[in-house]
Image (tube, grey):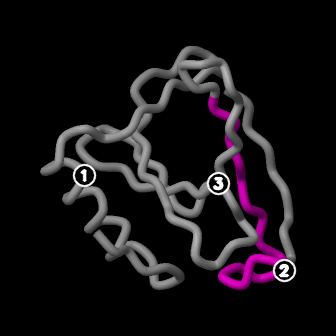
Amino acid sequence: MEKNNDNFDEFDEFDDEDVIESITVTDEDGNEIEFYILDVVEHKGGTYLLVIEDIEDDDTEATIIKEVEVDGDDVVYELIEDEEEFNIIAELFENNNEDYDIEL
């Protein structure tokens, strides 16, 4: 898992001075996908990231991923499968920041 920091002037939700961190995830087919991290929350010892794939599209859909394993610089993330857990984390993101809207 590789982490990158890039500054994007095109993304309206952030000031020019903000740095948007990104992570590169390898899916089960070996394809690398770059996600941009909008927010991070901690809940009951777990770390959750609100991420998007396209930083330039104002209508892009966000995804919540959960950190499940850390081994040095390598981090493993997975989608939240449990609906109750997902709803709790989505509500935390919704209450955590006013820069974005969460629609379930």
SS under mark 2 = loop
- Above or below 19: residue 100: below
| Position of residue 54 measured from the top left corner of the image (x, y, whole percent) | 69, 61
> Toward the viewer: 12 or 16?
12
Three-letter code, disc 1: Phe
In this picture, which residue range is highlighted in magenta? 10-25
Q: Identify the main secondary structure in magenta.
A: loop
Asked if residue 3 lies in the magenta stretch, the reply is no
Give whichever of discs 1 and 3 has the lower sequence position. Answer: 3
SS under mark 1 = helix
User: Residue 86: which disc?
Assistant: 1
Mark 1–mark 2 contact, CB under 8 Å?
Answer: no
Residue at image location 40% in from the left, 27% down from the top:
68
| Position of residue 40 measured from the top left corner of the image (x, y, whole percent) | 48, 55
| Position of residue 95 measured from the top left corner of the image (x, y, whole percent) | 32, 76
Other residues around mark 1 within 10 Å, as few (<14) / some (14–19) / many (≥20): some
